[in-house]
Amino acid sequence: MVQPKRVLTGAAGLALDGAFRASVLARSGLLAPARPDRVVRAGLALSGWSATLAGGVTVAALLHPGDRAIVDERGSLTFAELQRRTNALARALRELGVGPGDGVAVLCRNHGGFVEAAVAASKLGADALFLSTGLAAPQVRAVLDRERPVVVIHDAEFAAAVDHVDAARRLVAWPEDAPAAGGTAIDALIAGGDAADLSPPPRPGRTILLTSGTTGAPKGAARGEPGSLEPVAALLSRIPLRAGETTHIASPLFHSWGYTHLALGIALRSTLVLRRHFDPEATLAALARDRAAVLVVVPTMLERILALGADVHRRHDASALRVVAASGSALRAGLPAEFMDAFGDVLYNLYGSTEVGWVAIATPAELRAAPGTAGRPPRGTRAAIYDERGLAAAPGAVGRIFAGNGIEFEGYTDGGGKEVIDGLLSTGDLGHFDAAGQLFVDGRADDMIVSGGENVYPSEVEDVLVGHPAVADVAVVGVADEQFGQRLVGYVVRAAGAAASADDLKAHVRATLAAFKVPREIRFVDELPRNATGKVLKRVLVADAAEPTVEPTADAAT
């Protein structure tokens, strides 16, 4: 696998005050008392494995071996069982040639096999490459050809996308519903393997996450495993997760948000509930059955849960929920209040990126008081706004968002990186801080539309349009225009039963915003193209907007 290029030196690192860190970890229950002999063994294990995924499982298996670690559609695993199974899988991978720094690709939905693959790779110091299950087969092949992992662990349903890989290097994690296509089932390797504990590798592995690819082909972003619990403490300082609770991770594990909660959940010795496919009512039913305290989602999942309506909500007792943690794309204006009105003030929204990790987190109180806010940076994170010249933007002015926290990525696997100013990494977004120090994201820097010499942020227009009762979903893009440079095109999904016209929606925007921000054209669609984490694929819309609409002829209209 190509070694990633280091792009940050001396960035704003996570250096939390010791007393603050200890108080946060104690409040979460991570430092709860345990049997002295187990504590000693766990301390020795943590000193060797550090705060890696492998270390988290090893420590949890020592402290709470009989507690449930994973629950999926095939059953459950305790921490002791997870430890033994990942030991055996790691040894099997080593026999296939996987060593420190080698690549292990994972193309799996949310289930225990994904977790076992990630932990086994961590135990070997291998680099785990997580592939989106939403990629088309040619995209999967292109990424595998570029990254060249030693082994590919995949669900059987994706066999056709990986059939160019030697059969001996294909391992099937979930065999149901599709043929294995020559791959070996990891269950067979585990059953016949040596489950004895391994020694820590000479170097920790990396995780390689794919960028969202909303404006182009996804790239591999490499990040080393954390060497301490400081990132955990930083996140817990804003999102009050507690040790030993049940967490339902609906967000895809291959995405940075889902993977973050996999790592957090293991560190907190949580019971992680996983399902291969998201269904809004099935999720509510699972929350009620498991008395889950935490739900991890992307915003489109919140929308689908809300769309079920109050009658369905009342069928399932979700009163145990303390935290609904959302990230992955922008929240629709009004969504936080609507969700919290239905489920209580439990919503926490994280703004960040695959490359920089987190930038800011908004608490329920902040989402209530300042709708649209991305919140505040957690302890140990520094965020700043710079103008196009790389100078600090004036207070309240919109500019480019940069951040640093010590968990930034190490670079793209092709050797590229992101712009760095004053040790802070570019997020690629535009935003501003208000007078109270809360961050607001105004849109992607590469999404900004210049129409007739005026700058237009699509998110501003989208927020106005989605406020119309006839609009269920919307995206605004810019397309080349000979007269204005760019013109605005709005893509609108009508609300059920609504009959608003394009002129109605233009008038709605004109009543709130300047004339140059009114879309020149409104196109009605059944749904917006989105990736697996719910982000709108605007490059698809830009390509569509460049094509002229076909007006029906008089004959066709009769």
Image (cartoon, rainbow, N blue to C red):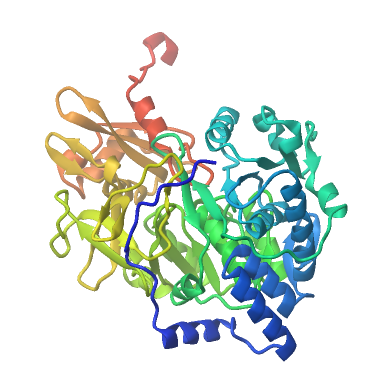
x%, y% of residue 440? 29, 60
Residue at (58, 35) in percent of width and height: 144
Residue occupying the far top of the picture = 555
Residue at (24, 73) in percent of width and height: 436
Q: Nearer the viewer, residue 136 or 551?
A: 136
Residue at (32, 63) in percent of width and height: 11
The C terminus appears in which quarter of the rendering? top left
Q: Nearer the viewer, residue 101 or 453?
A: 101
x%, y% of residue 491? 37, 36
Relative to 222, 489 lies left or right: left
x%, y% of residue 352? 40, 58
Count of marks, rendered view: 0
On screen, 454 above or below 403?
above
On screen, 539 above or below 33?
above
Residue occupying the far front of the picture = 202
Would residue 390 be seen by someone viewing this image from the given angle?
A: yes
Relative to 227, 176 lies left or right: right
The N terminus appears in which quarter of the rendering? top right
Relative to 182, 310 lies left or right: left
x%, y% of residue 217? 45, 34
State the image quarter where residue 308 is shown. Answer: bottom right
On screen, 135 above or below 62?
above
Would residue 318 be seen by someone viewing this image from the given angle?
A: no
State the image quarter where residue 547 is shown. Answer: top left
Q: Nearer the viewer, residue 464 or 279?
A: 279
Residue occupying the far right of the picture = 192
Residue at (37, 38) in percent of width and height: 500
State the image quarter where residue 163 is shown. Answer: top right
On screen, 225 above or below 43?
above
